[in-house]
Image (cartoon, rainbow, N blue to C red):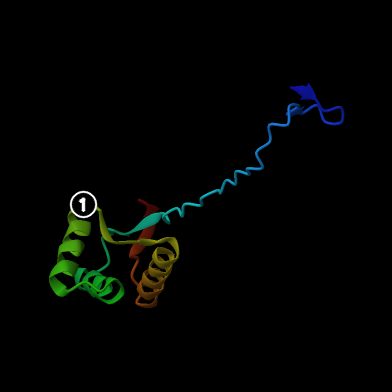
Amino acid sequence: MGRDMAGGADFEDGGGDTGTVVVTRTRTVAKRPSMYRVLLLNDDYTPMEFVIHVVESFFQKNREEATRIMLHVHHHGVGECGVYSYEVAETKVTQVMDFARKHQHPLQCVMEKK
């Protein structure tokens, strides 16, 4: 092995080059998007029937599922309505909050990273 004067790199000196080139590829692995839980928070003023209506309307739950979620919110202070990508979760939170304000209810809807 000898030293190249310009860059200090090693080079083959004995003519052993076979003409073979190795090409490496970088493989890109797509990362799954983060998911977000959309949660309703309990308060002492929003009627239960309104919460059921919100869950049915904005989260496409049937009456039984919506009632179960509403009761979970009522008894535990918080209830999960669904898990979505960031953009979808953000949109649902905004829609629910706007709808609650329009109907003069203090219902709170938030999102948290799963």
Above or below 60: residue 114: above
Residue at position x 73%, y 29% in the image: 12
Q: Secondary structure at mark 1?
A: helix
Relative to 56, 106 lies left or right: right
Q: Nearer the viewer, residue 3 or 114?
A: 3
Query: Which residue does the image show at 46% across and 55% down from the upper left?
Result: 30
From the top left corner, tell me how far across and down residue 39 is, in percent: 31, 59
Residue 26 percent across, percent down from the top left? 55, 48
| Horizontal and vertical percent position of residue 98 | 41, 73
Q: Is residue 35 above or below residue 64?
A: above
Please, what is the three-letter code of the amino acid marked with disc 1?
A: His
Q: Is residue 78 left or right of residue 92?
A: left
Q: Residue at x 76, y 27 (%)?
A: 13
Q: Residue furthest right?
A: 6
Q: Quadrant of the N terminus?
A: top right
Say which of 105 and 7 sits in front: 7
Q: Nearer the viewer, residue 3 or 32?
A: 3
Label 1: how many residues lie within 10 Å, few (<14), some (14-19) or many (20+)? few
Q: Is residue 52 left or right of residue 101?
A: left
Q: Position of residue 81 (x, y in %)?
A: 27, 63
Q: How many marks?
A: 1
Q: Which residue shows up at 45% across the image and 53% down it? A: 31
Q: Quadrant of residue 108?
A: bottom left
Q: Quadrant of residue 94?
A: bottom left
- Residue 105 left/right relative to 65: right
Disc 1 target residue = 76
